Each structure stands twice: as structure tokens, then as C-alpha cells.
Image (spheres, helix red, strand yellow):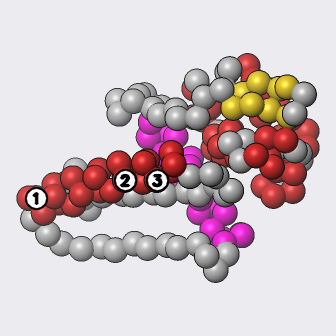
């Protein structure tokens, strides 16, 4: 699965295939994602080799939707950085009015930092429940960074 996490487009295309119109007509993704059809086909083949999708008479079937790297995975930081860079590239080139971006730099104490982290984990559980109940029509990126500028 290292290949899956070393190229953000593989993950993006995988998740796009959970949307009915793209699993039926994946070639539409080449225009949407601004990639060649050849490159798209290479990614689709990779997803098939990873047993994440299967080609059938209607297009593609997603076999596995919820894939997560374990917290201590050796490729975790590389993957997170690549996804952030891809998000920034997309933001700089193609963002729409509906996209929402937010960042803040603040000072607080350790207890509050821990409380913020715990609240975010609760929020993530709610997001996961909402996503599972939804009928997907779009693919979105959600990033959250809580890092110290002073701890080294």
C-alpha cells in the first residue's frame, strides 16, 4: 500500500470512484483533475492491482472505501506532506467560492492544547458518521494541524 500513500492522486481517484457518475465513467476524471487519460488509466490499473477497485460491465466497483494509515506508519509524514502539497497546488490553481480555508496561530497552555485535540477527535467521529450516511456527489479535503512552534 506504500504506492497508494506516495501519490495523492491515487487516493483522490479512489475516492472519486465512490461517486456513481465517476465509477460509471472514470474517464471524466481526467478533465476534472486535469490529468491525461493515460495517467488516469495507470492509476486505475494500480487501484485494481491493490484490490481496491474492480472493473465490471458498468465501470468500476469500489471494494474498499475506508483505508487509513496507522499512527506510527513509516510513510505517514511523507503521505501527509504530499497531500498537503497537492491541496495547496489545487487551492492556488483551481479553488472555488465554496472552498473554505482557515488557519490561526495562537498561544495557550498545555491543558487547553490537549482539550482542543480531544475536541477535534470528537469532531472527526461526527464527520465520519455523516460521511457514512451520505450519498457522495463530491470529494473534499479536510486537514487539521495542531503543532507547536516552540517544542523541538
Give the SS element for disc 1.
helix
Q: Which residues are magenta?
A: 76-95
Q: Are marks 3 and 1 in contact (CB under 8 Å)?
A: no
Closer mark to the observer between disc 2 and disc 1: 2
- Residue 92 left/right relative to 40: left
Which disc number belongs to residue 137? Answer: none
User: As rendered, which of 82 and 121 lies closer to the eye?
Assistant: 121
Give the SS element for disc 3.
helix
Residue 103: x percent and y percent?
40, 72
Q: Earlier in the sequence, mark 2 or mark 1?
A: 1
* Res. 148 in view: yes
Residue 51: x percent and y percent?
68, 20
Q: Earlier in the sequence, mark 3 or mark 1?
A: 1
Residue placed under numbered mark 1 in the picture:
110
User: As rendered, which of 24 and 90 lies closer to the eye?
Assistant: 24
Q: Is residue 35 magenta?
A: no
Residue 123: x percent and y percent?
33, 56
Closer mark to the observer between disc 3 and disc 1: 3
- In the image, residue 72 sits, relative to residue 36, either above or below, namely above
Q: Which image quadrant is residue 5 in?
A: top right
Residue placed under numbered mark 2 in the picture:
126
Give how far apart the Cα atoms at labels 2 and 1 are.
Answer: 25 Å
Q: Are marks 2 and 3 in contact (CB under 8 Å)?
A: yes
Q: Which image quadrant is residue 15 in?
A: top right
Q: Are marks 2 and 1 in contact (CB under 8 Å)?
A: no
Q: Residues within 10 Å of mark 2 (few under 14, many from 20)?
A: few
Residue placed under numbered mark 3 in the picture:
130
Amino acid at each position: 500500500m506504500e504506492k497508494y500513500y506516495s501519490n495523492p492522486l491515487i487516493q483522490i481517484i479512489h475516492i472519486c470512484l465512490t461517486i456513481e457518475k465517476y465509477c460509471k465513467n472514470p474517464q471524466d476524471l481526467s478533465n476534472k483533475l486535469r490529468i491525461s487519460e493515460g495517467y488516469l488509466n495507470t492509476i486505475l490499473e494500480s487501484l485494481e492491482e491493490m484490490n481496491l477497485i474492480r472493473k465490471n460491465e458498468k465501470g468500476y466497483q469500489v471494494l474498499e472505501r475506508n483505508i487509513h494509515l496507522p499512527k506510527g506508519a513509516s510513510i505517514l509524514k511523507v503521505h501527509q506532506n504530499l497531500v498537503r502539497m497537492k491541496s495547496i497546488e489545487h487551492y492556488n490553481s483551481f479553488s472555488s467560492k465554496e472552498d473554505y480555508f482557515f488557519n490561526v496561530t495562537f498561544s495557550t497552555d498545555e491543558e487547553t492544547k490537549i482539550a482542543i485535540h480531544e475536541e477535534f477527535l470528537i469532531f472527526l467521529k461526527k464527520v465520519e458518521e455523516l460521511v457514512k450516511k451520505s450519498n457522495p456527489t463530491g470529494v473534499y479535503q479536510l486537514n487539521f494541524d495542531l503543532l507547536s512552534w516552540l517544542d523541538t
